[in-house]
Image (spheres, grey):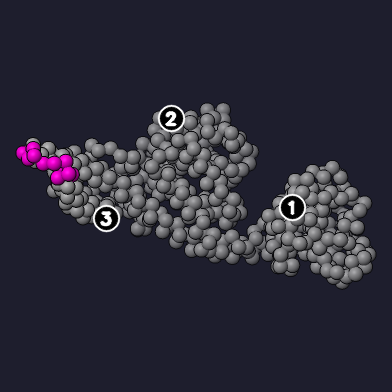
Amino acid sequence: MYILAAGLNYRTAPVEIREKFTFQQQEVPTALEKLRAMHSILECALVATCNRTEIYCIVDHIHCGEQHIMVFLQEQFGIDRSEFRKYLYFHSGENAVRHLFKVSCGLDSMVLGETQILGQVRDAYDMSLEHNAMGTILKQLLPLAIVVGKRTHTETDIGKNAVSISYAAIELGKKIFGQLTDKRVLIIGAGKMSELTAKHLNSSGVEQVYVVNRTFHRAEELATKFKGVAVEWANIQDCLADVDIVVSSTGATDYVVDAPMMKDVMKRRKNRPIFMIDIAVPRDLDPAINDVEGVFLYDIDELEGVVEANKKLREKEIDQISLIIDEEINNFALWLNTLEVIPLIKALKHKTDDIYENTMESLFNKLPDLTEREKKVIRKHTKSVINQILKHPITQAKEMAANKDSKEQLEMIATIFGLEDAASYDCECVKLDSKAAPKSSMKAMSYFASFGRM
Protein backbone atom coordinates (compact mmCIF):
# COMPACT_ATOMS: atom_id res chain seq x y z
CA MET A 1 0.00 0.00 0.00
CA TYR A 2 1.06 3.58 -0.65
CA ILE A 3 0.35 7.12 0.49
CA LEU A 4 -0.89 9.25 -2.39
CA ALA A 5 -1.72 12.96 -2.44
CA ALA A 6 -3.47 14.64 -5.37
CA GLY A 7 -4.81 18.11 -5.91
CA LEU A 8 -4.73 21.50 -7.50
CA ASN A 9 -4.00 24.81 -5.81
CA TYR A 10 -3.33 28.48 -6.47
CA ARG A 11 0.17 27.63 -7.75
CA THR A 12 -1.00 25.15 -10.39
CA ALA A 13 -4.46 26.38 -11.38
CA PRO A 14 -5.99 29.83 -11.99
CA VAL A 15 -9.04 30.86 -10.01
CA GLU A 16 -11.40 30.13 -12.92
CA ILE A 17 -10.27 26.48 -12.73
CA ARG A 18 -10.10 26.22 -8.92
CA GLU A 19 -13.65 27.49 -8.52
CA LYS A 20 -14.91 24.56 -10.61
CA PHE A 21 -13.41 22.06 -8.16
CA THR A 22 -14.75 23.33 -4.86
CA PHE A 23 -16.72 21.24 -2.36
CA GLN A 24 -19.56 22.64 -0.31
CA GLN A 25 -19.41 21.31 3.24
CA GLN A 26 -22.60 19.30 2.81
CA GLU A 27 -21.13 17.60 -0.28
CA VAL A 28 -18.04 16.21 1.45
CA PRO A 29 -19.63 13.13 3.12
CA THR A 30 -21.03 11.85 -0.19
CA ALA A 31 -17.76 12.64 -1.96
CA LEU A 32 -15.79 10.68 0.63
CA GLU A 33 -18.16 7.75 0.24
CA LYS A 34 -17.74 7.76 -3.56
CA LEU A 35 -13.98 8.09 -3.32
CA ARG A 36 -13.64 5.34 -0.73
CA ALA A 37 -15.77 3.01 -2.88
CA MET A 38 -13.42 3.34 -5.85
CA HIS A 39 -11.09 0.50 -6.73
CA SER A 40 -7.55 0.83 -5.29
CA ILE A 41 -8.51 3.52 -2.73
CA LEU A 42 -8.41 2.11 0.80
CA GLU A 43 -8.50 5.30 2.90
CA CYS A 44 -9.16 8.93 1.99
CA ALA A 45 -9.54 12.50 3.27
CA LEU A 46 -10.39 15.79 1.53
CA VAL A 47 -8.76 19.16 2.25
CA ALA A 48 -10.93 21.75 0.49
CA THR A 49 -10.33 25.52 0.70
CA CYS A 50 -10.72 28.51 -1.61
CA ASN A 51 -7.12 28.12 -2.73
CA ARG A 52 -6.79 24.33 -2.92
CA THR A 53 -8.64 21.06 -3.35
CA GLU A 54 -6.55 18.10 -2.20
CA ILE A 55 -7.17 14.39 -1.75
CA TYR A 56 -5.03 12.25 0.57
CA CYS A 57 -5.36 8.51 0.06
CA ILE A 58 -3.94 5.13 0.93
CA VAL A 59 -3.94 3.12 -2.30
CA ASP A 60 -2.92 -0.40 -3.23
CA HIS A 61 -1.19 0.76 -6.41
CA ILE A 62 0.15 4.21 -7.32
CA HIS A 63 -0.82 4.31 -11.00
CA CYS A 64 -4.29 2.83 -10.39
CA GLY A 65 -4.83 5.26 -7.52
CA GLU A 66 -3.98 8.23 -9.74
CA GLN A 67 -6.33 7.06 -12.49
CA HIS A 68 -9.23 6.48 -10.09
CA ILE A 69 -8.76 9.90 -8.48
CA MET A 70 -9.03 11.51 -11.92
CA VAL A 71 -12.17 9.47 -12.64
CA PHE A 72 -13.61 10.62 -9.32
CA LEU A 73 -12.93 14.30 -10.08
CA GLN A 74 -14.34 13.92 -13.58
CA GLU A 75 -17.56 12.37 -12.29
CA GLN A 76 -17.86 14.63 -9.25
CA PHE A 77 -17.58 17.90 -11.18
CA GLY A 78 -18.69 16.84 -14.66
CA ILE A 79 -15.44 17.98 -16.30
CA ASP A 80 -13.45 15.76 -18.64
CA ARG A 81 -10.01 14.88 -17.28
CA SER A 82 -8.37 16.28 -20.42
CA GLU A 83 -9.45 19.73 -19.24
CA PHE A 84 -7.92 19.54 -15.76
CA ARG A 85 -5.09 16.99 -15.93
CA LYS A 86 -2.42 19.65 -16.58
CA TYR A 87 -3.44 21.48 -13.39
CA LEU A 88 -3.39 18.37 -11.21
CA TYR A 89 -0.37 17.30 -9.16
CA PHE A 90 0.38 13.97 -7.51
CA HIS A 91 2.80 13.17 -4.66
CA SER A 92 3.49 9.72 -3.23
CA GLY A 93 5.45 8.22 -0.36
CA GLU A 94 7.52 10.68 1.61
CA ASN A 95 6.79 13.41 -0.93
CA ALA A 96 3.08 13.12 -0.09
CA VAL A 97 3.74 13.28 3.64
CA ARG A 98 6.10 16.24 3.25
CA HIS A 99 3.54 18.08 1.13
CA LEU A 100 0.80 17.55 3.74
CA PHE A 101 3.09 18.80 6.52
CA LYS A 102 4.03 21.91 4.49
CA VAL A 103 0.34 22.57 3.86
CA SER A 104 -0.58 22.23 7.55
CA CYS A 105 2.07 24.71 8.72
CA GLY A 106 1.31 27.32 6.05
CA LEU A 107 4.44 26.92 3.93
CA ASP A 108 2.32 26.09 0.88
CA SER A 109 -0.21 28.90 1.46
CA MET A 110 -0.63 32.08 -0.54
CA VAL A 111 0.01 33.98 2.69
CA LEU A 112 3.15 32.36 4.12
CA GLY A 113 2.55 30.98 7.60
CA GLU A 114 -1.21 31.63 7.75
CA THR A 115 -3.01 29.63 10.42
CA GLN A 116 -6.44 29.13 8.85
CA ILE A 117 -5.25 26.09 6.88
CA LEU A 118 -4.47 24.24 10.13
CA GLY A 119 -8.14 24.36 11.08
CA GLN A 120 -9.06 23.17 7.58
CA VAL A 121 -6.76 20.15 7.91
CA ARG A 122 -8.40 19.39 11.25
CA ASP A 123 -11.83 19.67 9.59
CA ALA A 124 -10.68 17.21 6.91
CA TYR A 125 -9.60 14.75 9.60
CA ASP A 126 -12.84 15.11 11.58
CA MET A 127 -15.02 14.69 8.48
CA SER A 128 -13.13 11.65 7.21
CA LEU A 129 -13.15 10.06 10.66
CA GLU A 130 -16.85 10.71 11.16
CA HIS A 131 -17.74 9.08 7.85
CA ASN A 132 -15.43 6.06 8.24
CA ALA A 133 -13.21 6.98 5.29
CA MET A 134 -9.95 6.59 7.23
CA GLY A 135 -8.02 3.57 8.45
CA THR A 136 -4.86 3.00 10.45
CA ILE A 137 -2.50 5.11 8.33
CA LEU A 138 -4.47 8.34 7.86
CA LYS A 139 -5.66 8.18 11.47
CA GLN A 140 -1.99 8.55 12.40
CA LEU A 141 -0.87 10.83 9.57
CA LEU A 142 -3.45 13.65 9.71
CA PRO A 143 -3.20 14.23 13.48
CA LEU A 144 0.58 14.30 13.05
CA ALA A 145 0.15 16.98 10.36
CA ILE A 146 -1.83 19.01 12.90
CA VAL A 147 1.01 18.54 15.41
CA VAL A 148 3.46 19.86 12.79
CA GLY A 149 1.29 22.95 12.26
CA LYS A 150 1.02 23.63 15.98
CA ARG A 151 4.76 23.15 16.54
CA THR A 152 5.48 25.52 13.67
CA HIS A 153 3.48 28.33 15.25
CA THR A 154 4.69 27.76 18.83
CA GLU A 155 8.37 27.05 18.15
CA THR A 156 9.00 29.62 15.39
CA ASP A 157 8.00 33.22 14.58
CA ILE A 158 6.35 32.32 11.25
CA GLY A 159 3.01 33.84 12.30
CA LYS A 160 4.17 36.82 14.33
CA ASN A 161 4.58 39.38 11.56
CA ALA A 162 1.69 40.69 9.42
CA VAL A 163 1.96 39.90 5.71
CA SER A 164 -1.28 41.40 4.38
CA ILE A 165 -2.00 45.12 3.99
CA SER A 166 -5.19 45.09 6.07
CA TYR A 167 -3.65 42.99 8.83
CA ALA A 168 -0.49 45.15 8.83
CA ALA A 169 -2.69 48.19 9.34
CA ILE A 170 -4.26 46.65 12.44
CA GLU A 171 -0.89 45.53 13.78
CA LEU A 172 0.40 49.07 13.33
CA GLY A 173 -2.56 50.33 15.37
CA LYS A 174 -1.68 47.87 18.14
CA LYS A 175 1.90 49.16 18.24
CA ILE A 176 0.63 52.72 18.69
CA PHE A 177 -2.19 52.06 21.17
CA GLY A 178 -0.98 48.86 22.84
CA GLN A 179 -4.40 47.20 22.67
CA LEU A 180 -7.51 48.02 20.67
CA THR A 181 -10.38 46.67 22.74
CA ASP A 182 -11.38 50.10 24.07
CA LYS A 183 -10.73 52.02 20.82
CA ARG A 184 -13.36 53.36 18.43
CA VAL A 185 -12.69 52.70 14.76
CA LEU A 186 -14.11 54.30 11.64
CA ILE A 187 -13.97 52.37 8.37
CA ILE A 188 -14.46 54.53 5.29
CA GLY A 189 -15.67 52.38 2.38
CA ALA A 190 -17.53 49.08 2.27
CA GLY A 191 -15.58 47.00 -0.27
CA LYS A 192 -13.66 43.74 0.15
CA MET A 193 -10.59 45.40 1.70
CA SER A 194 -12.78 47.24 4.20
CA GLU A 195 -14.54 43.99 5.10
CA LEU A 196 -11.21 42.21 5.61
CA THR A 197 -10.03 45.08 7.80
CA ALA A 198 -13.25 44.90 9.85
CA LYS A 199 -12.69 41.16 10.27
CA HIS A 200 -9.17 41.74 11.63
CA LEU A 201 -10.46 44.46 13.94
CA ASN A 202 -13.16 42.16 15.22
CA SER A 203 -10.65 39.36 15.94
CA SER A 204 -8.46 41.91 17.77
CA GLY A 205 -11.29 42.64 20.20
CA VAL A 206 -12.51 45.98 18.83
CA GLU A 207 -16.16 46.39 19.78
CA GLN A 208 -16.97 49.92 18.54
CA VAL A 209 -16.81 49.98 14.73
CA TYR A 210 -18.42 52.64 12.55
CA VAL A 211 -18.78 52.30 8.78
CA VAL A 212 -19.34 55.20 6.42
CA ASN A 213 -19.95 54.80 2.70
CA ARG A 214 -21.46 56.97 -0.05
CA THR A 215 -24.07 54.25 -0.57
CA PHE A 216 -25.61 53.96 2.89
CA HIS A 217 -27.12 50.48 2.51
CA ARG A 218 -23.64 49.09 1.71
CA ALA A 219 -22.41 50.66 4.95
CA GLU A 220 -25.33 49.02 6.77
CA GLU A 221 -24.53 45.59 5.29
CA LEU A 222 -20.90 45.71 6.41
CA ALA A 223 -21.69 47.18 9.82
CA THR A 224 -24.29 44.46 10.47
CA LYS A 225 -21.73 41.69 9.83
CA PHE A 226 -19.53 42.95 12.67
CA LYS A 227 -22.16 44.42 14.99
CA GLY A 228 -21.06 47.93 14.05
CA VAL A 229 -22.87 51.18 13.32
CA ALA A 230 -23.54 52.55 9.82
CA VAL A 231 -22.99 56.30 9.43
CA GLU A 232 -24.45 58.60 6.77
CA TRP A 233 -21.79 60.11 4.50
CA ALA A 234 -22.89 63.61 5.49
CA ASN A 235 -21.95 62.85 9.11
CA ILE A 236 -18.37 61.77 8.42
CA GLN A 237 -16.85 64.78 10.22
CA ASP A 238 -18.87 64.10 13.37
CA CYS A 239 -17.56 60.53 13.33
CA LEU A 240 -13.96 61.64 12.71
CA ALA A 241 -14.20 63.87 15.76
CA ASP A 242 -15.19 60.92 17.93
CA VAL A 243 -13.05 57.90 16.88
CA ASP A 244 -9.44 56.90 17.62
CA ILE A 245 -8.55 55.04 14.42
CA VAL A 246 -9.57 55.58 10.79
CA VAL A 247 -9.07 53.02 8.02
CA SER A 248 -10.02 54.23 4.54
CA SER A 249 -10.43 52.09 1.42
CA THR A 250 -12.84 53.44 -1.20
CA GLY A 251 -12.85 53.58 -4.99
CA ALA A 252 -12.93 57.38 -5.04
CA THR A 253 -10.74 59.26 -7.52
CA ASP A 254 -10.39 62.32 -5.25
CA TYR A 255 -9.53 62.71 -1.58
CA VAL A 256 -12.48 61.87 0.67
CA VAL A 257 -10.79 63.59 3.61
CA ASP A 258 -8.53 66.61 3.02
CA ALA A 259 -6.31 68.73 5.25
CA PRO A 260 -8.78 71.61 5.86
CA MET A 261 -11.44 69.12 6.97
CA MET A 262 -9.02 67.47 9.40
CA LYS A 263 -7.96 70.85 10.83
CA ASP A 264 -11.60 71.51 11.73
CA VAL A 265 -11.94 67.98 13.12
CA MET A 266 -8.82 68.35 15.29
CA LYS A 267 -10.16 71.60 16.77
CA ARG A 268 -13.26 69.70 17.87
CA ARG A 269 -11.02 66.92 19.22
CA LYS A 270 -8.89 69.52 21.04
CA ASN A 271 -5.89 67.96 19.26
CA ARG A 272 -6.54 64.53 20.80
CA PRO A 273 -4.37 62.21 18.62
CA ILE A 274 -5.92 60.20 15.80
CA PHE A 275 -4.37 57.34 13.84
CA MET A 276 -5.32 57.25 10.13
CA ILE A 277 -4.52 54.49 7.64
CA ASP A 278 -5.05 54.95 3.90
CA ILE A 279 -5.04 51.61 2.05
CA ALA A 280 -6.78 52.91 -1.08
CA VAL A 281 -5.29 53.37 -4.53
CA PRO A 282 -5.76 56.18 -5.56
CA ARG A 283 -5.34 57.59 -2.06
CA ASP A 284 -8.41 58.58 -0.05
CA LEU A 285 -6.65 60.75 2.51
CA ASP A 286 -4.85 63.93 1.58
CA PRO A 287 -1.10 63.47 2.37
CA ALA A 288 -1.10 67.03 3.77
CA ILE A 289 -3.19 65.67 6.65
CA ASN A 290 0.05 64.35 8.13
CA ASP A 291 1.08 67.96 8.77
CA VAL A 292 -1.96 68.59 10.96
CA GLU A 293 -1.02 68.45 14.63
CA GLY A 294 -2.16 65.28 16.37
CA VAL A 295 -2.74 63.32 13.16
CA PHE A 296 -0.62 60.22 12.39
CA LEU A 297 -1.19 59.16 8.77
CA TYR A 298 0.13 56.06 7.01
CA ASP A 299 -0.49 55.21 3.36
CA ILE A 300 -0.38 51.90 1.48
CA ASP A 301 3.26 52.33 0.41
CA GLU A 302 4.37 52.57 4.02
CA LEU A 303 2.28 49.53 4.91
CA GLU A 304 3.66 47.58 1.94
CA GLY A 305 7.13 48.32 3.26
CA VAL A 306 6.09 46.79 6.59
CA VAL A 307 4.57 43.78 4.81
CA GLU A 308 7.68 43.14 2.71
CA ALA A 309 9.92 43.39 5.76
CA ASN A 310 7.63 40.98 7.61
CA LYS A 311 7.65 38.52 4.70
CA LYS A 312 11.42 38.40 4.90
CA LEU A 313 11.20 37.78 8.64
CA ARG A 314 8.79 34.92 8.01
CA GLU A 315 11.01 33.46 5.30
CA LYS A 316 13.85 33.30 7.80
CA GLU A 317 11.80 30.74 9.74
CA ILE A 318 11.55 28.29 6.82
CA ASP A 319 14.81 26.49 7.63
CA GLN A 320 13.72 25.88 11.23
CA ILE A 321 10.30 24.70 10.07
CA SER A 322 11.96 22.32 7.62
CA LEU A 323 13.80 20.74 10.56
CA ILE A 324 10.48 20.26 12.38
CA ILE A 325 9.00 18.65 9.27
CA ASP A 326 12.01 16.34 8.88
CA GLU A 327 11.74 15.32 12.54
CA GLU A 328 8.04 14.50 12.28
CA ILE A 329 8.52 12.64 8.99
CA ASN A 330 11.12 10.56 10.76
CA ASN A 331 8.70 9.92 13.65
CA PHE A 332 6.01 8.85 11.21
CA ALA A 333 8.44 6.59 9.39
CA LEU A 334 9.47 4.92 12.64
CA TRP A 335 5.82 4.36 13.54
CA LEU A 336 5.11 3.07 10.05
CA ASN A 337 7.91 0.55 10.24
CA THR A 338 6.61 -0.84 13.52
CA LEU A 339 3.48 -1.90 11.59
CA GLU A 340 5.64 -4.24 9.53
CA VAL A 341 6.43 -6.28 12.62
CA ILE A 342 2.80 -6.71 13.72
CA PRO A 343 2.20 -9.92 11.70
CA LEU A 344 5.31 -11.48 13.24
CA ILE A 345 4.28 -10.52 16.78
CA LYS A 346 0.77 -11.85 16.16
CA ALA A 347 2.21 -15.09 14.82
CA LEU A 348 4.56 -15.41 17.80
CA LYS A 349 1.74 -14.85 20.30
CA HIS A 350 -0.54 -17.19 18.38
CA LYS A 351 2.05 -19.97 18.48
CA THR A 352 2.83 -19.53 22.19
CA ASP A 353 -0.90 -19.42 22.99
CA ASP A 354 -1.39 -22.71 21.17
CA ILE A 355 1.53 -24.28 23.04
CA TYR A 356 0.23 -22.90 26.32
CA GLU A 357 -3.33 -24.20 25.83
CA ASN A 358 -2.16 -27.65 24.65
CA THR A 359 0.24 -27.89 27.59
CA MET A 360 -2.43 -26.89 30.11
CA GLU A 361 -4.89 -29.39 28.65
CA SER A 362 -2.31 -32.19 28.78
CA LEU A 363 -1.25 -31.27 32.32
CA PHE A 364 -4.78 -31.14 33.69
CA ASN A 365 -5.61 -34.47 32.04
CA LYS A 366 -2.66 -36.04 33.82
CA LEU A 367 -3.57 -34.37 37.13
CA PRO A 368 -7.35 -34.74 37.31
CA ASP A 369 -7.50 -34.15 41.08
CA LEU A 370 -6.38 -30.52 40.88
CA THR A 371 -8.84 -28.02 42.31
CA GLU A 372 -10.03 -25.03 40.29
CA ARG A 373 -7.92 -22.75 42.48
CA GLU A 374 -4.80 -24.85 41.84
CA LYS A 375 -5.49 -24.84 38.09
CA LYS A 376 -5.88 -21.07 38.20
CA VAL A 377 -2.54 -20.62 40.01
CA ILE A 378 -0.76 -22.89 37.52
CA ARG A 379 -2.28 -21.05 34.57
CA LYS A 380 -1.31 -17.66 35.99
CA HIS A 381 2.32 -18.54 36.68
CA THR A 382 2.80 -20.46 33.44
CA LYS A 383 1.39 -17.52 31.47
CA SER A 384 3.73 -15.18 33.35
CA VAL A 385 6.74 -17.28 32.35
CA ILE A 386 5.69 -17.22 28.70
CA ASN A 387 5.14 -13.42 28.75
CA GLN A 388 8.55 -12.84 30.32
CA ILE A 389 10.20 -15.03 27.68
CA LEU A 390 8.39 -13.14 24.88
CA LYS A 391 9.02 -9.64 26.22
CA HIS A 392 12.58 -9.27 24.98
CA PRO A 393 12.07 -10.81 21.50
CA ILE A 394 9.02 -8.59 20.90
CA THR A 395 10.91 -5.47 22.03
CA GLN A 396 13.86 -6.39 19.80
CA ALA A 397 11.57 -7.06 16.84
CA LYS A 398 10.02 -3.58 17.18
CA GLU A 399 13.47 -1.99 17.32
CA MET A 400 14.68 -4.03 14.35
CA ALA A 401 11.73 -2.76 12.30
CA ALA A 402 13.44 0.64 12.11
CA ASN A 403 16.65 -0.81 10.68
CA LYS A 404 17.55 -0.66 7.00
CA ASP A 405 17.84 -4.47 6.77
CA SER A 406 14.77 -5.08 8.94
CA LYS A 407 13.23 -7.66 6.60
CA GLU A 408 16.20 -10.01 6.90
CA GLN A 409 16.38 -9.55 10.67
CA LEU A 410 12.66 -10.16 11.17
CA GLU A 411 12.85 -13.24 8.94
CA MET A 412 15.61 -14.53 11.19
CA ILE A 413 13.35 -14.14 14.26
CA ALA A 414 10.57 -15.95 12.40
CA THR A 415 12.96 -18.76 11.54
CA ILE A 416 14.29 -19.07 15.10
CA PHE A 417 10.77 -19.37 16.51
CA GLY A 418 9.51 -21.51 13.64
CA LEU A 419 7.02 -18.90 12.40
CA GLU A 420 7.00 -19.90 8.74
CA ASP A 421 3.42 -18.64 8.34
CA ALA A 422 4.01 -15.24 9.95
CA ALA A 423 3.32 -13.41 6.69
CA SER A 424 -0.15 -14.91 6.53
CA TYR A 425 -1.29 -13.01 9.62
CA ASP A 426 -3.02 -9.97 8.22
CA CYS A 427 -3.06 -6.50 9.79
CA GLU A 428 -4.07 -2.98 8.80
CA CYS A 429 -0.63 -1.78 7.85
CA VAL A 430 1.47 -0.68 4.93
CA LYS A 431 3.53 -3.51 3.49
CA LEU A 432 7.02 -2.22 2.72
CA ASP A 433 8.76 -3.43 -0.42
CA SER A 434 12.26 -4.28 0.81
CA LYS A 435 13.58 -4.52 -2.75
CA ALA A 436 13.22 -0.80 -3.32
CA ALA A 437 16.52 1.00 -2.81
CA PRO A 438 16.78 4.26 -0.82
CA LYS A 439 17.05 7.32 -3.06
CA SER A 440 17.99 10.01 -0.57
CA SER A 441 20.64 10.62 2.03
CA MET A 442 17.99 11.81 4.45
CA LYS A 443 17.48 9.49 7.37
CA ALA A 444 13.72 9.60 7.03
CA MET A 445 13.84 8.84 3.31
CA SER A 446 15.37 5.43 3.95
CA TYR A 447 12.18 4.37 5.67
CA PHE A 448 10.03 5.65 2.83
CA ALA A 449 12.09 4.54 -0.12
CA SER A 450 10.20 1.26 -0.21
CA PHE A 451 6.92 2.84 0.85
CA GLY A 452 6.04 4.67 -2.32
CA ARG A 453 7.29 5.97 -5.62
CA MET A 454 9.76 8.85 -5.08
The residue singled out by tag 1 in the image is: 198
Left or right: residue 101 versus residue 189 is left
Q: Is residue 119 above or below residue 174?
A: above
Instruction: Give coordinates of residue 34: x percent, y percent.
Output: 48, 29
**Secondary structure at numbered mark 3:** helix
**Residue 263 falls in image quadrant:** bottom right
Tag 2, which secondary structure? Answer: loop
Instruction: Give the percent coordinates (x, y) of residue 359.
Output: 11, 41
Lateral position of residue 221 relative to residue 440, left or right = right
- At mark 1, the secondary structure is helix
Q: Which residues are magenta?
A: 366-376
Q: Residues within 10 Å of mark 1 (few under 14, many from 20)?
A: many
Query: Which residue, given by chain and number where applicable, does mark 3 sit on?
Result: 399
- Which residue is at the front of the view, 171 or 377? 377
Residue 38 badge: 2
What distance separates the C-alpha of mark 2 from that of mark 3? 36 Å
Give amino acid for label 2.
Answer: Met
